[in-house]
Amino acid sequence: MGYCFSPFLFRRRKTRTVVVGDPGKGGVIIGGDHPIVNQSMLTCDTMYTSLCVQQTLDLVAVGCQIVRITAPTVKDAANLKNIVAELTDRNCNVPIVADIHFKPDAAMEAAKWVQMVRVNPGNYADKKKFAILEYTDAEYVDELARIEEEFTPLVLRCKELGRAIRIGTNHGSLSDRIMNRYGDSPMGMIESALEFARIARKHNFHNFKFSMKSSNPKVMIACYRLLVARLEELGPDWNYPIHLGVTEAGEGEDGRIKSAIGIGSLMCDGLGDTIRVSLTEDSPRELPVCRDLQAQIPKLTLAADEESKLNSIHPVASPETVELFNGVEAACNPYVFKRRVSAEISLTESVKCGGEQTVRVVCARTVAEALTPRLRPRDDVRPEAVYESINVIEVDPAQNFAIDTDAVLVTVKDGIALPAISAFRLLATKLARMGRSNPILLKDTLAVEVAPLDSNIALLRASVVIGSLLADGIGDAILVRGESNAMLNIRLAFNILQASGCRSFKTDYVACPSCGRTLFDLQAVTARIKSRTLHLKGVKIAIMGCIVNGPGEMADAHFGYVGGAPGKVNLYVGKTPVKFNVPEAEAVDRLIDLICEHGKWVEPELAG
């Protein structure tokens, strides 16, 4: 199976096109040779027509090309008629997507009024009662027949009205049947989506795209790669477009870093036809991140048609190199995360690197000198080695090189013709070919900018480059150089390691963006929870506005805060609900009580 043209060279995946609305009147065409489309979602109740209209206009004003609105009931879906009519009266023809969970009748109503319907195969026709723990083949076939009966009317309606469909699976909301046969796995997500796609194709309906979203960037990357490889395997007419997104990414730097790792990594592989950066912030703030992220991809990749450069680095493009990179003896299995095996070495007198050690943070001497006077003895966010002071071999992986020992750190030297992602993938491949297990030091850039980068851009670039390689399983230490501010530099390095699941130095939050299903003020509640828990190390807290993705996306969270009803919150330990209908005014305190009860609480240190 192959998920991209080459892990070393950029070529955008060719897909069939999906038409959303009338392209001559504000609609968009997704896929083919058309640019990647940026989208977002409303945060208000769908029944508040004027507010929905205003939020839509606000999104369009900052460049949103598709707007998604939740439709949890038939009543909500019916009100989409009024929203679309008022938008049309105000000369706004942006395509509207109805977001559907649990209610096929709501989808049927929504299809009358909007240009696209998003369905989640995990809950479109499933009640999640866990009544059957194991499905026989006959029971499984019966379930597929029931799903076809539920989904076919929507397919036929969309075909009749010229609508599009997004088949969007979520890691957090797979059906009982899929969970019981495939587990909570990327393959389960893919099979769930393909079941619905086969029904659409049975009726000669092809105006649909896929999405495979997770709050864990590693899982998200694996899902999309597996999906595209599976589509390639099924045949050339399965070349449907895909929508990229890291769901429940959170807010601020953390949300941007997680999104850049997941979305940016896949765009560098040539995947993605629409994107959304899901932030627990006001929706218009997502669009600049989408644009900035897209703008970095040409700077971080080497296009497959740049023949002048390819002539000097022919080994990069060779089928043998690609096969070795994806092979058993290489560092990377693109479909299943496994950290590359490396030798353990001493980075400094007190810090080891490689082997079973955590991924280390290295900084330039200028950063270390600026930070030293500001560091306190118990600070966790601190450099663990200085680049100019460690023993490291710098090589050009596009050329022949020799290393006679595993007991030395290796990195890519500056100024070579390759971009960083390609260079470090090639380095891991060459080391595997040589039978070497040297630990690898990752850099976010192989050319330090003369003029300092804007911090927002430095964050995105470093997250895409280092996050992508870490998700491949490559990297034993990292060096961020694109961020010139010393404190921001070292914080960015640690935040990338946290977001990529390599290291935990602070509380980790899984927080969904708000939508019309949300049962409390997500931004305000997230801020309150963070103010009480940000000092906790190694604790993961999920903050979910409703139950749709809650328990599933909390799979590896220690505690969950989930909207259960208006003004009421359900609290979870892992995926298990333990307290129900807690008044919102008390819920944060009760969450802290839970953390204390399970031995995860420590008192914050007093400032000064």
Image (cartoon, rainbow, N blue to C red):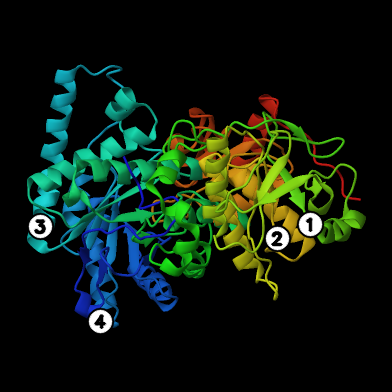
Residue 326: image x %, image y %? 43, 39
* Quarter of image, res 88: bottom left
Residue at 91% across, 50% down: 608
Q: Report the Cα–Cα distance between label 3 and label 1.
A: 58 Å
Q: Report the Cα–Cα distance between label 3 and label 4.
A: 26 Å
Q: Which sits earlier in the primary sequence, circle 2 or circle 1?
A: 1
Task: Say which of marks 3 and 2 sits in front.
Answer: 2
Name the residue beneath numbered marker 1: 364
Nearer to me, 345 or 49: 345
Q: Which mark is residue 481?
A: 2
Q: Are marks 1 and 4 in contact (CB under 8 Å)?
A: no
The vertical placement of 223 against 399, above or below, is above
Q: Report the Cα–Cα distance between label 1 and label 4.
A: 57 Å
The vertical placement of 210 against 95, above or below, is above
Q: Which sits earlier in the primary sequence, circle 3 or circle 2?
A: 3
Q: Are marks 2 and 1 in contact (CB under 8 Å)?
A: yes
Name the residue beneath numbered marker 3: 159
- Amino acid type at mark 1: Ala
Residue 46: image x %, image y %? 33, 60
Residue 299: image x %, image y %? 52, 67
- Amino acid type at mark 2: Arg
